[in-house]
Amino acid sequence: MISSNPGILISFAAYLLVMIAIGWYFYRRTKNVNDYFLGNRGLNKWVTSLSAQASDMSGWLLLGLPGYAYLAGMESFWLALGLITGTWLNWKLVARRLRIYTEVAGNAITLPEYFANRFDRKGHTLRMLAAVFILIFFLIYTASGFVAGAKLFNTVFGLSYQWALTTGVLVIIIYTFLGGFMAVSWTDFLQGIIMFLAIISVPVLAIMFLEGPGATLGSLQAQHPELLSIYTNTKGEPISTITILSSLAWGLGYFGQPHILARFMAIKSPHMLKGARRIAVTWSGISLACAILIGLFGNLVVQEPLTETSSETIFMYSVDVLVPPLLAGVVLSAILAAIMSTADSQLLVSSSAFSEDFYKSVLNPKASPRKLVIISRLTVVGVALVAFLIALDPQSSVLDLVSYAWGGFGATFGPLVLLSLFWKRMTYRGAIGGILAGGLTVIIWKPIQGGIFDLYEILPGFIISVFTIVIVSLFDQKPSEEVIGKFAEAHKT
């Protein structure tokens, strides 16, 4: 346990109450599934950008990445470079086109619905496949957030891992269940601000604690020179090409993350996206750099060396050393903000995949809007409970769980999103082949990674999915004139 200071407990309690209050506010304003899943396309650029990036980064920004930098040093630079490049490309290439195309394609409010409408197919195969893979990978992704929350409460308050896990899960369920997309987006907006302020403050305080930038760099060079090279690992060996490619490949994941793409679909006007992109890329670049600095400086600030298992708590222990007790609770709340900002978004997208793309399209096409909202809220609870069971292992690594889910989404949906937006010759059967090829490659590749193929599974999955989409589409019949017409309409706006 880091601290028994009552100020920390009060800060956490106040933060949690604010999140629940936002959920209740939007609960009273939610009338239908369009409100619940996309907020009736009413987000401004600030909420769009910060909620997208906060839900993107999750607990791993303050736990997983600093822990990686603490152990591996500047090797983590390649991961951060891949992520910031992917962030910019996603906002530049996908955001505007997806916002326009989802409205042209039958005002689609979920990613699977967009896929089906894009190819003007009434069948359920593509929507159901997309929904199944969303549920599979979001169960793992949501579990990573729950693990991060459990580590936070366990480290700060000394709660048992199981009780710490239960506390975080309950709060996330409550405000996501109540408020839907607008509650999630506005809480993510506030959480993004909290995360940003916290992640900047800790490296700055560390430099002050270590008596200035020059002294800090000198101490690192003297005590831990193995951490300062981007070309060699901590053993002094050259970083392999496969390791660098695997780190850079994280950037490919952005094109297939449903909870991030939903923000593009929900902004009030496509014209706002340019400003939102600048905000998002700036936020991400500074946050990623500071996360690495926290890990590096943690080797100097925290005297007791952390093991590989406990390295993901370096942010918390740094706060304990650097931040006055009255402010420590506010700074540590940033971890809770990071966790919740992603877990709530994932629960909501999982809920939409089940209620809209399975229940409504297959089981009950005549379901009323009110009934769909009820089904969606019950799905939030169900998905959270399964993710809770996955997260029960206290030895779980936040970064490992995020890595697998991130790779799964990137390979399963990334090629499909990009080619559907840019290639008019793509066909319905090509889309089905791409989803199966990308998703199954990740699932099959993961068990053998580290053996013969020490390569992050997103890269082979992404390549195989693109290849499959192109080959199947070229051998398939050309899309109908109506599909080509919608493509042209989406691109002239």
Image (tube, grey):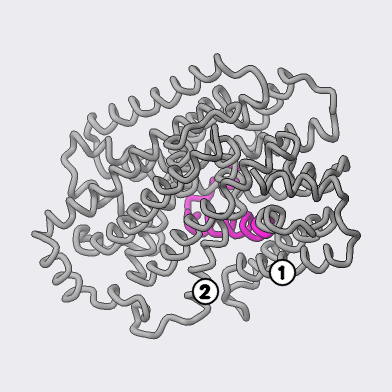
**Magenta span:** 387-415
Would you say 358 lies left or right of 291 here?
A: right
Q: Residues within 10 Å of mark 1 (few under 14, many from 20)?
A: some
Give residue 236's position: percent from left, percent from top: 33, 84
Nearer-the-camera pick, 79 or 328: 79
Relative to 466, is 480 above or below? above
**Cβ atoms under marks 1 and 2 closer than 8 Å:** no
Nearer-the-camera pick, 258 or 278: 278
Question: Label 1 sits on what residue type?
Answer: Ile
Q: Residues within 10 Å of mark 2 (few under 14, many from 20)?
A: some
Nearer-the-camera pick, 36 or 43: 43
The residue shown at (52%, 25%) is 174
Give residue 298's position: percent from left, percent from top: 25, 60
Relative to 282, is 20 above or below? above
Can you see residue 388? no
The residue shown at (55%, 18%) is 27
Give residue 121's position: percent from left, percent from top: 86, 44
Q: Which mark is residue 245?
A: 2
Disc on the earlier residue, 1 or 2: 2
Q: Which mark is residue 6?
A: none
Disc 1 versus disc 2: distance between alpha carbons?
16 Å
Would you say 156 lies left or right of 243 here?
A: left
Residue 408: image quadrant is bottom right
Would you say 195 lies left or right of 119 here?
A: left
Q: Which residue is mark 1?
A: 464
